[in-house]
Image (tube, rainbow, N blue to C red):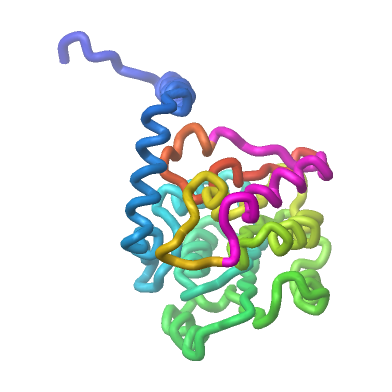
């Protein structure tokens, strides 16, 4: 085998972490990666990921990061604000089937007519899914979520609905109290702040008015959470830079 070094698992993990830190310092590489994401968005790149046949509307890099978090923290409940076509709900349920967990709650103001039927076609994976049709920032919706979660603090929350500053800030304030110490709140699509206005896909949000601006304000007002830069450093391609939050206090 020549001079090839054989690493222990601990040594390999340290090598990975250090390599990720160095990669994050490579500003030219990071900008090139962002440029790829911006250009590929003209072809709806983030819409190309499926799980069990249903679109996830997220990059594979971010989906794998969510998998790592779920494996590490073993949440009993996962709350996703913004359901779309249900692929990510099936993804979470597949992981819970292996790792354990109680329920996955999907909230959306619009649920496609045949979504429940399509999800139900996956048999056992659909049994832990609960869909709530309503606005994520309405008190009635929050009340329904709380009734399901109860006093449990082993909760992961994923914010991926309406991406304006005001809407996301309200979601952060409403749902962050459900996340206990050591668990995660993921603020999706913070990359909107870092890319040019999306003229090819007109949206009410853009630079200066998006999830990242809301997150910055939230973190100034709330000391229970911190950004877990471990994911920023290693993902390179991500829709949620700086959006992986870990609760550090109860």
Q: Is residue 70 visible?
A: no
Q: Which residues are magenta?
A: 204-230
Question: Left or right: where does residue 136 sit relative to residue 243?
Answer: right
Residue at left offset 39%, top offset 50%: 38
Residue at left offset 49%, top offset 59%: 95
When the figure is inspected, residue 131 is found, relative to residue 92, above or below; the finding is below
Residue 102 lies in the magenta-colored region: no
Residue at left offset 54%, top offset 61%: 96
Q: Nearer the viewer, residue 100 or 130?
A: 130
Residue 234 in percent (x, y) is at 46, 34
| Quarter of the figure that contains the N terminus | top left
| Quarter of the figure that contains the C terminus | top right
When the figure is inspected, residue 244 is found, relative to residue 166, above or below; the finding is above
**Direction left: furthest residue:** 2
Residue 14 in percent (x, y) is at 47, 21
Residue at left offset 44%, top offset 84%: 118
- Using the rendered view, name the quadrant where residue 230 is placed: top right
Residue 37 in percent (x, y) is at 38, 49
When the figure is inspected, residue 89 is found, relative to residue 62, above or below; the finding is below
**Direction top: furthest residue:** 3
Q: Is residue 132 visible?
A: yes
């Amino acid at each position: 085998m020549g001079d090839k070094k054989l690493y222990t698992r601990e040594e390999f993990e340290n090598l990975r972490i250090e390599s990720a830190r160095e990669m994050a310092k490579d500003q030219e590489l990071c900008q090139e990666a962002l440029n790829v994401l911006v250009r590929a968005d003209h072809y709806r790149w983030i819409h190309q990921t499926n799980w069990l046949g249903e679109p996830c509307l997220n990059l594979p890099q971010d989906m794998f990061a969510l998998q790592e978090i779920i494996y590490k923290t073993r949440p009993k409940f996962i709350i996703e604000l913004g359901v779309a076509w249900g692929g990510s709900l099936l993804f979470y349920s597949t992981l819970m089937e292996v790792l354990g967990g109680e329920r996955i709650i999907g909230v959306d103001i619009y649920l496609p007519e045949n979504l429940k039927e399509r999800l139900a076609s996956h048999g056992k994976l659909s049994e832990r899914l609960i869909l709530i049709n309503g606005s994520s920032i309405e008190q009635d919706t929050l009340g329904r979520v709380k009734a399901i979660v109860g006093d449990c603090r082993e909760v992961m929350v994923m914010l991926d609905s309406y991406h304006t500053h005001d809407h996301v800030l309200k979601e952060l304030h409403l749902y962050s109290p459900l996340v206990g110490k050591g668990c995660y709140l993921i603020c999706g699509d913070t990359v909107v702040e870092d890319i040019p206005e999306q003229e090819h896909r007109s949206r009410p949000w853009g630079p200066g008015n998006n999830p990242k601006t809301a997150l910055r304000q939230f973190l100034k007002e709330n000391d229970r959470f911190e950004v877990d830069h471990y994911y920023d450093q290693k993902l390179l391609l991500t829709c949620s830079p700086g959006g992986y939050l870990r609760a550090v206090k109860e």
